[in-house]
Image (tube, rainbow, N blue to C red):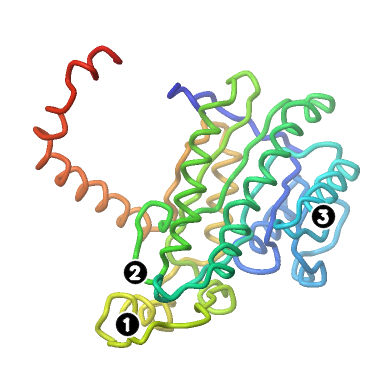
Amino acid sequence: MDDANTRPYHLPQDAVWFITGCSSGIGLALAQLVAKTSNRVVATARNPAALAGIPDGPNVFKHALDVTSIPSIDVALQAALSKFGRIDVVVNNAGHTLVGDTEAAGDEESRALMDINFWGMVDVTKRALGIMRDDNSKTGQQGGVILNVSSVGGWVGYPAGAFYHATKFAMEGWTEAVAKELPLNWNIHLCNIEPGGVSTNFASTSLKPMAKRHPAYADPSYPSNVVLGYMADPQIQKTWAKPSDMAAAMYHIASRGQRIPIRVPLGPDSYSMIIADLEKNQKLFEELKDLSMGIGQAAVAAFM
């Protein structure tokens, strides 16, 4: 059951990319990059007018897509198939965040975040699997790649973003399980992309503060306020990666002709924070190893 994504993937020279959330940031940069290659790109956004930054051409198709609407997803995917006949790479990039005091978060805004960040990805991916398995084989190579744009926040949780982290943790677990579920001969590969800080509007227009804040958390020294201050600091944002660098790395992952890993940290901050978290947790686990290993040893041995 651990043999997911072990075979190399070879991107067709005329591959079709289907990218959500292309109005800005990583989605925009990736669509612009793909448009410069021999590949073809379906660039989507809620409002197609927001896609003006992507050059027009015979290999570029722009379409409206609301990932929280299943009819909208079905229409966009079918339009892509009608235009290009196949979809080789799906990039689930659409999303936003919600910051503030978890205790004060409203149900509506919290569930809305899950709808776009998690369920939107799920609903696009479920339909893409059938296309990659059944439709792509009619025009050449079966299979494809699904890149789900998670975050370092899909591995490590920080104050002020509990619901955002919940969506990304859910994305990562779901993606890993599905990657291990698919038969290898379908040639479908899933990957969690884990960027660190990226200089996009994600830290401004896409960063939505909760409707209310709890007065008990007003102290500026409290963890949530420290993190919010960090995220809003323009000097800190200058150290973040460029969207074009993230786009180039993602294109490389899909096109390099090697296996597609289930997780890829992108950016020195993401890599360093994830490695540090691994080391910290390993130390904590080892401190309680005797307790962990001493429970139900006979039952564990029988199961293994």
Which badge, 2 or 1, is on the more N-terminal residue?
2
* Residue type at tag 3: Val
- Foreground residue among 289 and 103: 103
| Residue 76 in the image, given as x and y percentages of width and height | 82, 51
Residue at disc 1, secondary structure: helix
**Side (left or right) of 196 relative to 59:** left
Q: Above or below — where is 281 with respect to 178?
A: below
- Specify the label residue 60 is tagged with: 3
Outermost top residue? 302
- Foreground residue among 151 and 239: 151
- Foreground residue among 224 and 233: 224
Q: Crowdedness of circle 3 by 10 Å Cα count: few (<14), some, many (20+)?
A: many
- Specify the label residue 159 is tagged with: 2
Disc 2, disc 1: CB below 8 Å? no
Q: At 68% from the left edge and 42% from the top edge, which residue is drawn?
A: 89
Nearer the camera: disc 2 or disc 1:
1
**Side (left or right) of 181 relative to 15:** left
* Residue type at tag 2: Pro
Nearer the camera: disc 2 or disc 3:
2
Give the residue at mark 1.
Answer: 217
| Residue 195 in the image, given as x and y percentages of width and height | 46, 57
Residue at disc 2, secondary structure: loop
